[in-house]
Every structure is written in C-alpha cells, then in structure tokens.
Image (tube, rainbow, N blue to C red):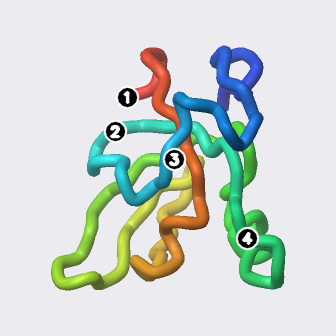
C-alpha cells in the first residue's frame, strides 16, 4: 500500500484535505491521516490496521445507524457508527 508521503498527503491533523471517515462515501478509497482516539480503543483501531497511510474503503453503511463495513488493506472490519468519527482520512486521485 502507498504511504502518505508517496501520496503527497500531509499527516498534520489540521490538513485541509483531511476529513472524518463519516464523510467518505461507499466505494471511494482514502488514506488514514489520523486516529483521534488515544485510549485502549485507539490501540484497538491501530491493531486492526487504521494507521496513518493505510488504504481504506467504506464497503457499506448499515441503515439506521448500524455498523459500517470498512476495507482496511486486505481485511474487512465492522465499526459502529459512533466509532467512525475518530478516524480522519484524505482522498487522493491515485486511490479509488
């Protein structure tokens, strides 16, 4: 997977090109910029592959606030809607 530096993305949290994963539509690829969770849940997200530079794609969003299916590298992870906003991402023309 391409790294953030090779994609030309800035890892600064205030990067204007970055936004919450909540705003990424299904089927669009993005790179993780930051995980804004420092506790044990943040560690769990990083262990699942949500690390800066990781390629992700929203596969589906369940209706009525149900879980989301998100491709992280080669695996698919389910996240609750309330947990999705802590992940900041950035789209890039090279990702789809």
Q: Residue at x 48, y 76 (%)?
A: 79
- Mark 4 is surrounded, within 10 Å at the Cα level, by few (under 14), some (14 to 19) or many (20 or more) other residues, namely some
Q: Could you tell which of marks 4 and 2 lies nearer the N-terminus?
A: 2
Dots 3, 2 in contact, CB < 8 A? no
Q: Is residue 30 above or below residue 87?
A: above
Identify residue for label 1.
96
- Mark 1 is surrounded, within 10 Å at the Cα level, by few (under 14), some (14 to 19) or many (20 or more) other residues, namely few
Numbered disc 2: secondary structure: loop
> The N terminus lies in which quarter of the figure?
top right
Dots 2, 1 in contact, CB < 8 A? yes
Q: Could you tell which of marks 4 and 1 lies nearer the N-terminus?
A: 4
**Which mark's residue is nearer the viewer, 4 or 3?**
4
Q: In this view, does 69 lie above or below 17?
A: below
For the residue pair 54 and 19, the one nearer the viewer reads as 19
Dots 3, 1 in contact, CB < 8 A? no
Dots 4, 2 in contact, CB < 8 A? no
Numbered disc 4: secondary structure: loop
Q: Is residue 27 above or below residue 71?
A: above
Spatial distance from mark 3 to mark 1, Cα to Cα?
10 Å
Q: In this view, does 94 lie above or below 17?
A: above
Q: Could you tell which of marks 4 and 3 lies nearer the N-terminus?
A: 4
Q: Could you tell which of marks 2 and 1 lies nearer the N-terminus?
A: 2
Numbered disc 1: secondary structure: loop
Residue 19 horizontal side relative to residue 58, left or right = right
Identify residue for label 4.
37
Name the outermost residue toward the left.
Answer: 63
Where in the figure is residue 30, as x and y percent of width and height?
49, 37
Identify residue for label 2.
28
Q: Residue 82: which numbered mark, if any?
A: none
> The C terminus lies in which quarter of the figure?
top left
For the residue pair 44 and 83, the one nearer the viewer reads as 83
Picture quarter containing residue 75?
bottom right
């Amino acid at each position: 997977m391409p790294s953030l530096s090779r994609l030309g993305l800035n890892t600064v949290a205030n990067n204007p090109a970055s936004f919450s994963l909540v705003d990424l539509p299904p089927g669009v690829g993005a790179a993780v910029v930051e995980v804004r969770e420092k506790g044990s849940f943040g560690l769990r997200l990083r262990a699942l592959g949500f690390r800066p530079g990781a390629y992700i794609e929203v596969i589906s969003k369940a209706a009525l606030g149900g879980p989301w299916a998100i491709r992280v590298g080669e695996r698919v992870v389910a996240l609750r809607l309330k947990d999705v906003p802590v992940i900041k991402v950035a789209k890039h023309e090279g990702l789809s």
